[in-house]
Amino acid sequence: MEYNTSRNKLLLHEYGRNVQNMIAHAMEIENSEDRNKAAQAIIEVMGQLNPHLRDVDDYRHKLWAHLFIMSDFNLDVESPYEIPEKEALMEKPNEMPYPKSKIKFGHFGQYSQKILDGAKLLEDEKEIDYMTFAMGNFMKKQYLLHNNTSVDNSLIAKQLKELSEGKLIMENPEEDLVSTNVLLKTLGLVKNQNQNNKRHNNNNNNNRNKQFGKKKFKR
């Protein structure tokens, strides 16, 4: 029995061993015209094995690139497209710089911090009032996404003032902020919370029944 470990390495597994063998055979054809015909036939087989590639822009170009990759760039045929260079495909991409911006309150997100940084430049009282109301309720909504059990309105007002460096001050957070129940419904968390409470109660009942058992009374 011949094991895969003793065979040549598959360069692109999605095409299988037979296509790899077809390419190896085409590389041994001495006549260039026959070799080009064999390459065209292999391209058609590759397209049938991977029909999803037809949804990709210029999918035949991709098939030809795969053909040369599986031949380890040793197949000498005429391609309707530019033959890719092995060195270019093996080249590693440049490392992407990781953002190092610091966020004081992570649950509010980076964009909230940027908006509040811009709010420091506001001078018009109406714009300041609007921004205070809008960002206060947005921050409360973001807080509830991370903790949907309770929220302290005074805490939201305090953190709003802190992040805006005293520019956005909410004098009456209990009145200015939308109620927690309304926000939970908007976020679709009320149903989930009720389901969790019901599941928790059922689990408690089941554990209690297992611990004490059901008493049986005789007449």
Image (tube, rainbow, N blue to C red):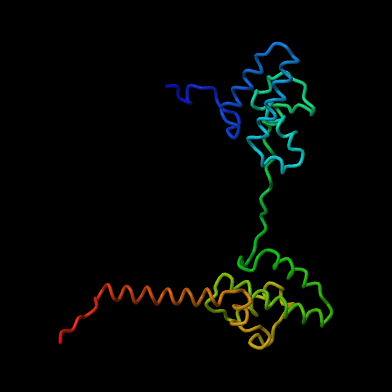
- As drawn, is 127 to the left or to the right of 141? right
Q: Splitting the image into 4 quarters, where does residue 156 fall?
A: bottom right
| Of 58 and 187, the residue lying toward us | 58
Q: Position of residue 216 (x, y in %)?
A: 20, 81
Asked if 197 appears above or below 47 in the picture, the reply is below
Q: Position of residue 185 (x, y in %)?
A: 60, 78
Q: Quadrant of the N terminus?
A: top left
Q: Position of residue 152 (x, y in %)?
A: 57, 81
| Of 108 and 215, the residue lying toward us | 215
Q: Splitting the image into 4 quarters, where does residue 210 fall?
A: bottom left
Q: Splitting the image into 4 quarters, where does residue 205 fall?
A: bottom left
Q: Residue at x 77, y 72 (%)?
A: 119
Q: Residue at x 64, y 22 (%)?
A: 23
Q: Residue furthest left?
A: 219
Asked if 42 appears above or below 62 in the picture, the reply is above
Asked if 80 appears above or below 141 in the picture, the reply is above
| Of 139 and 183, the residue lying toward us | 183
Q: Residue at x 74, y 28 (%)?
A: 84
- As drawn, is 195 to the left or to the right of 160? left
Q: How many marks?
A: 0
Asked if 176 appears above or below 9 in the picture, the reply is below
Q: Position of residue 127 (x, y in %)?
A: 81, 79
Q: Quadrant of the C terminus?
A: bottom left
